[in-house]
Amino acid sequence: MDGLDVIVGEIAAEMAAAAERGKVADYIPDLASVSPRHFGIAVIMADGTCHVAGDADLAFSIQSITKVFTLTMALGAVGDALWKRVGREPSGSAFNSIVQLETEHGIPRNPFINAGAIVVADVLLARHQPGEVIAEFLRFMRTLAGDESIVIDHEVAQGEQRTGFRNMALANYMRAFGNVHHPTENTLGIYFHQCALAMSCRQLAQAGRFLMNGGRNPETGRSVVSAQRARRILALMLSCGHYDGSGEFAYRVGLPGKSGVGGGILAIAPGVASIAVWSPGLNERGNSQLGTLALERLVQRTGWSVFEPVVQCGV
Ligand code: GLU
């Protein structure tokens, strides 16, 4: 067993014993019944080795973590023109807040709050049918993860379609400002289905490898995005990836990360590792309570941080 196997095993054991596990999101019907006892971790290193512990192979609803991948697709489709419709600043508000949209003329603060991700979904819809976009998204995720077994949980999507009144309000409000171009049921259809993607920690860490690897999928050798775009996506993850808890996550973990209300977090140590953790109980800001703690312990024990001195900057 190598040192990292020992570390992830220890962390999983510590998380299994944790008393304070947070509260499972209950506003999406199918998420309410997930047990807060789960914890999984997967660490994939730049050389391809994989270190897992706990429920690392159990699929869960990755929810807002998909926003990283739809952003990647939208940037591929329209490039920097995206930034005319979505900002790049932390919102300081809850993930589903509507308040800033009024004063900011229907332009969401960033692509990782719900309003921003709905605009990104609308961008993907240009010249396509919703079903095509969802199929393309699923293909993209399977290719990135190198795993054809990944699926969308349609019950989760339907549950959100039935109860997602706030997201409907956001989409309609932005349509009134002209920043959603398609019928809102189509745009939201994409958004709800992307959020309902089910992946395990191992699959999610695999899908994140291109971000650790300068934009290139290490398995296929193909460039997914340029190195510059990968850096910029990571910058957004660091500044906006944890809703209004992004500053706290940067302080405690020091890595770009994106969380979802299903309790997952994808974190990237550039050039070193792609890491996924999952524990369904959330803290008061809607981020995985034990997922955050596990990442904090991982970086303490490995020394991984984007705030470590740059020893080889190539100049
Ligand atoms: N589908 C969820 C919603 O829109 C995603 C929220 C999240 O993971 O932040 O409410």
Image (cartoon, rainbow, N blue to C red):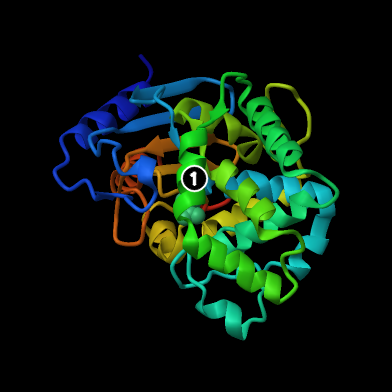
Figure label count? 1
Residue 130: percent from the left, percent from the top?
A: 72, 44
The N terminus: image quadrant: top left
Between residue 42 and residue 201, name the one nearer to us. Answer: 201
Residue 258 in view: no
Q: Is residue 285 above or below residue 234?
A: below
Between residue 290 and residue 95, name the one nearer to us. Answer: 95
Q: Secondary structure at mark 1?
A: helix
Residue 174, located in which quarter of the rendered image? bottom right
Q: Is residue 232 above or below residue 141?
A: below
Q: Is residue 250 above or below residue 291?
A: below
Q: Is residue 90 above or below residue 274?
A: below
Label 1 CB less than 8 angstroms from ligand 1: yes
Residue 137 in view: yes
Residue 10: percent from the left, percent from the top?
A: 25, 29
Which residue is labeled 1 in the image? Answer: 63
**Residue positioned most to the top:** 1
Q: Residue at x 34, y 24 (%)?
A: 53
Q: Residue at x 47, y 36 (%)?
A: 155
Between residue 15 and residue 305, name the one nearer to us. Answer: 15
**Residue flagged by tag 1: what amino acid is it?**
Gln
Q: Is residue 163 left or right of residue 179?
A: left
Q: Residue at x 35, y 61 (%)?
A: 285
Q: Is residue 208 left or right of residue 87?
A: left
For mark 1, does the 10 Å Cα neighbourhood hold few (<14), some (14 to 19), or many (20 or more) residues? Answer: many
Residue 288: percent from the left, percent from the top?
A: 34, 48
